[in-house]
Image (cartoon, grey):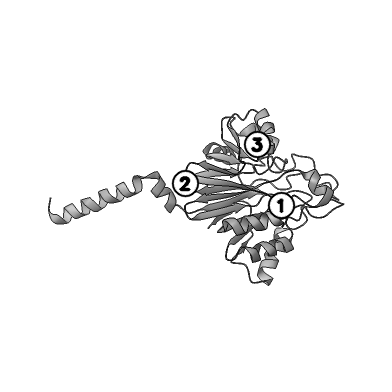
Amino acid sequence: MNRKDFLKSSLLIGGLLATSSPHAFANKRRTTVRLLRHATLWVEMGGVKLLVDPMLSAKDAMAPVQNAGNDFRIPMVDLPLSANEVKSLVSQCDAVLVTHIHRDHWDSEAHASIPKNKPIFCQPSDLEKIRELGFENAVAIASDYPFQGLSITRTGGQHGTGEIGQLMGAVSGFVITAGADKLYIAGDTIWCGEVETAIATHKPDTIVVNAGAAQFLKGDPITMTLDDIEKVLKASGKATVIAVHMDTVNHCLLHKTDVTKYASENNVTKRLLVPADGEVVSV
């Protein structure tokens, strides 16, 4: 073997060895967030695939949210996937992350479709109910949890104010870290001290907020309004904010077109993203 061939061979072998480490390879993979519908996300970080807040029912399969001023059945739109594509994603995911177990985040179709041995990560108050459904590998994340090279940290939130907020029960967000990438999934919360603390503490690169300004006939909104999103933008520096949780459930009164208009009028279209159902965002 001459010197030229030896060098080529060495570079090839070196390249293979450098990428043969799963950890080294995973850290070079880009983080992607795909909105499936509402708050249902497909997240890929560090080579790990997470299905977040799965609401997998067909359009109109569930009764409307009561006391919302309309009687539109939910989900109000179909998933942007065929039944076989949904089945494939459920099979491919390494774990399922459930921020809380309201039916627009964890519905009966998800209960039936997701294999019972699939890891399910949830907040502590939901663990017993999820295990009662037969999910033997459900894990409650109280603070931090390592998973296949990721670090998953639970954060707090407020699902509304006053009596309505208390009735809505406990909700959580989660910060997922893969190498230098930090993704904060805020969950069903309004702007509050817990969200402000999570942003200040973890300094995420990307924040997913559940918008929609969901509201009942009485009481204040229970998910983020435009004012709340503006506060997230201001608090998070240069972070990318992805607004979801709209145009799918009948009590969500803030629409994607509203947030898109706000982003355009306030010159934040590069920071505030409003993905279409099925769209993939690389961050």
State the image coordinates of residue 254 (x, y, percent, origin top left).
Answer: 75, 58
- Labels 1 and 3: the sequence-earlier one: 3
**Secondary structure found at label 3:** helix
Residue density around tag 2, few if under 14, some if 14–19, many if 20 or more, within 10 Å:
many
The answer, for residue 275, to whether it is visible in the render is no
What residue sits 70% from the left and 45% below the top?
171
Q: Label 1 is placed on what type of residue? A: Thr
Residue of label 2: 47
* Sequence-first tag of 2 and 3: 2
Disc number lying in front (2 or 1): 1
Of discs 2 and 3, which sits in the foreground? 2
Question: Callout 3, which amino acid?
Answer: Ala
On screen, residue 151 above or below 125: below
What's the distance in space between the residues labelled 1 and 3, CA to CA?
22 Å
The answer to the question of whether label 2 and label 1 lie on touching residues, with beta carbons closer than 8 A, is no
Where residue 177 sits in the image (x, y, percent)?
52, 50
Which disc, if any, is residue 49?
Answer: none
Q: Nearer the viewer, residue 271 or 172?
A: 172
Q: CA distance from mark 2 to mark 1?
A: 28 Å
Callout 2: helix, strand or loop?
A: loop
Quick one: label 2 or label 1, which is nearer the N terminus? 2
Residue 124, compared with residue 208, is above or below; it is above
Q: Which residue is mark 3?
A: 110
Left or right: where does residue 28 sit relative to residue 210?
left
Residue 225: where, in percent of width, then height?
74, 59
Going by the numbered disc 2, the residue's amino acid type is Gly
> Going 52% across and 44% down the picture, which residue do you hit?
49
Residue 189 is marked as: 1
- Viewer can see residue 106: yes
Give the percent coordinates (x, y) of residue 188.
70, 49
